[in-house]
Structure formats: structure tokens, C-alpha cells
Image: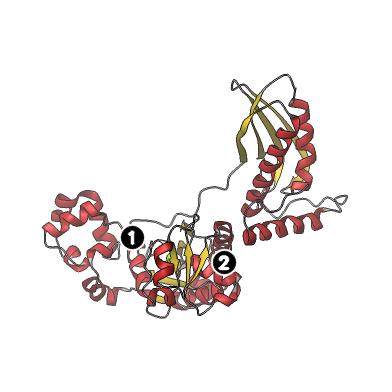
Amino acid sequence: MKHYLALADCDCFFVSAERAFNRKLENRPVAVLSNNDGCVVSRSKEAKALGLKMGEPYFMAKQRLPDILYVRANHDLYQATSHKVMALFKSFTPEVEVCSVDEAFLDLTGTKLLYKQNYIKTARDIRQAAWDKLHIPVSIGLSTTKTLAKLASDKAKDAGGVFAIGAAERRKILAQTLISDVSGVGKKLLAQMREECIFTALDFVMRPDYWIKAQFGAHGADLKNELSGIALFKVTPEGKAPLSIQQTSALKEFSRALEVLQAELRRHIHAACRKARREGAKATTIEVMLRTKDFRVVTRKEKLPFPTSEETEILPPAMRLLAALYTPAVVWRSTGITLAGLSYDAGEQQDLFRQTAKSDDRLGKVLDELEAKFGKDIVHLG
Ligand SMILES: [Mg+2]
């Protein structure tokens, strides 16, 4: 059966995420700098047009191009935005393979009957929804194989955002495509191909199968099939959701002090709950771990009265477990929390006596949003 695959790729993702958050950055030359303000890691098209280079060191760029707005990378914001984008993709088809923070393969095969429209129209709808709901520009390439969909997405950027490679135009497009621009062609393979006078993707697929197999092995044969519209690489949606979330790290220095362990554990719980909320998971069991200076591990777990991903509900029992494990006679090396027995379904039983549930959920979300905007660790429950 033929599959219809899309590669959806966010345009200059870090810049776009910054713009979605701060609309003042729209239509202006913007560049995002790496964490330590070292170099340019994302450019708006206006910045690109001014001649700003990817990877250019900031100290050089700001002298050469002082009119560009340079923004420090906020990876929590990008991570949170990425989750929203992927969730939006998944609302169109469950068959989503996340490739990176800003890129995913979507298998649209089943959607033609569902939406009663062709794939190009569906791709346009996805693109429009990403813009309307999240203010993130997305380019989408469509074809019957991953390799062709990727090529199509590269073309989509200059073709109104959606580009399809069907059987009719495939040959023409392969003739226009340098083999070096095909994904899966690494440096070594490229050098070998040049030896054989293969410069375009068409040069490559015109060679006979047996010759390709002999020259470039199974990988070469796969690549030819993929470029010829025969899918070998399937879209594989994310693996199973995690069953537990663990957060642990060594103390800055060994300690006997309960307060030090408490502060550290609180930090871990915060990070673990945040991760759980991102995954849409709720814990039914928690386990607190302590490790002694000489690497002995002690743990204690407790079943929670109801599934939750809220710090306010996990902190008290966790602190009780910590107190039960703790003894001042021992020097401790590290502490950690595990959220286990994670449940993901919305079919969670509503506890009539749990009046706080709703407001707490909202609190957690607000904390996550604040962090996404202003950086990690700015907020903590006291
Ligand atoms: Mg991208």
C-alpha cells in the first residue's frame, strides 16, 4: 500500500518561538544566540537577508550588523513550544514521528477518507493551524517516501509552505537536486558518488540496481528505492510513553544536614512534576531515594491516594519518606525521586473529596508557563 508522508519542519524555529512569545519581534531582523551568548544559532529571514551567518560569533556579528535584534536562547521556551507544535500535528494524525525539536514525519495515509480532501489540502490545513493557534510558521513536504518528503520540505520554504513530489514531477525534481542535498548521503558516500560522476539525485537513480548495490551496498539500494518513490523507511510514532520519571543528582558536597537533602529533593520533585505535566502523565506511586557517601542506596515508596503530577500533592508524602529514611549519623551523597505507575488516560477516576484538584492543576500549568517564559528555576513552591 502506498503511504502519503509529510515532513513538517518549523521555519527558523528558535526565532519563531521567540516571536510567538513576543510579537514585537515580528517582521524585524532577529537572531537567537547560543546559551553563553557565543554565536548565532537561529536567524529570521530578515537577518539572513542582511548577511548574518549561521554560527557567526556574537562579538563579530553585533559589530558588523548592529541593527539585528540578538536574543539569548531560552531552551525551555523552545521545548514547551515544540510540545505544542507536536501535539497540534498529532491532532491531525496519530502517526507522528518526532525527529527533532522542530521537525516531524506525519503519515497522512489514513486522513484522505477522514477529512475527505487530498493530502495537499490537509497539509495546508496543518500549516494554517500551526500559524493560527501557535503563531509558528511550518513548511511541509509531501511525498510517498521519507527521503522524498524531506526533499519536498526543503522546496516548500520557497513554494508557499507546502510542496508535494508526486510520481509525475519526481524525475524533474531529482534532476534539479544535488545528490549532496539528499538526506542519508553522508560525506563518505558523497565522495564515492563523485568518483562515479553522480552529481544529481537523477544521476543516482538512473544507475542500475545491481551496480548501486555493488558500489554502495544495501544503504545505496535503499536510497535509490526511496528516491524512486518506493518507501522503505516507515514513520514510527514515538515509543511507548515512559512508565516512570526519575530525577536524581549528586549533592554539591556530601552532607549530613536534613535541610540540604530537603532542598535538593524539592528541586528534583519540581523537575519531575514538570516533566510529568509535559508528558501528560500522573504518578500513582512515589519513591524517594538516598545514596550514602559510600554508594549504599536506601529507598522508600508510597502509593498516592490519587494520580497526580502536582508538587503540592507530592511534596508532603515525599518529605515524610525522606524523614523516615534520614539519619544524621550518615553522610549522604545524593537524593532522588521517582514518579512511578504513571497514568496517561483522561479516564482517571474523579475523587469527589478532592476539591483541590482543579485549582492545583492550573497552578502547575502556570508554573510551567512562567518557567518557559522566564527560565528554569525561577519559581519554586516554598
Ligand atoms: Mg526547521
Quadrant of res 298 = top right
| Residue 234 in view here | yes
Please state which of residues 126 and 135 is positioned toward the viewer in this rendering: 135
Side (left or right) of 69 relative to 210: right
Label disc, if present, on residue 362 of the rendered structure = none
Amino acid at circle 2: Leu
Residue 228 percent coordinates (x, y)? 26, 65
Image quadrant of ligand 1 equals: bottom left
Q: At label 1, which amino acid type do we have?
A: Ala
Q: Quadrant of residue 90?
A: bottom right
Q: Which mark is residue 231?
A: 1
Disc number lying in front (1 or 2): 2
Q: Is residue 17 left or right of residue 302?
A: left
Give me the residue at 62% from left, 59% from top: 372
Residue at 26% from the left image edge and 60% from the top image edge: 225
Residue holding disc 2? 88
Mark 1 or 2 closer to N-term?
Answer: 2
Q: Secondary structure at mark 2?
A: helix
Instruction: Give left or right: position of 311 versus 129.
Output: right
Check disc 1: other Cα within 10 Å, few if <14, some if 14-19, many if 20+: many
* In the rendered image, the vertical position of residue 322 relative to residue 80, given as above or below: above
Across and down, in percent, residue 354 comes to 85, 50
158 sits to left or right of 250:
left
User: Is disc 1's CB within 8 Å of ligand 1?
Assistant: no
* SS state under label 1: loop
- 174 and 34: which is toward the camera: 34
C-alpha distance separating marks 1 and 2? 25 Å
**Residue 8 seen in this snapshot:** no
Residue 38, position in %: x, y? 45, 57
The location of residue 370, given as percent across then percent down, is 68, 60
In the displayed image of the protein, which residue is found farthest to the left? 196
Which quarter of the rendering shows the N terminus? bottom left
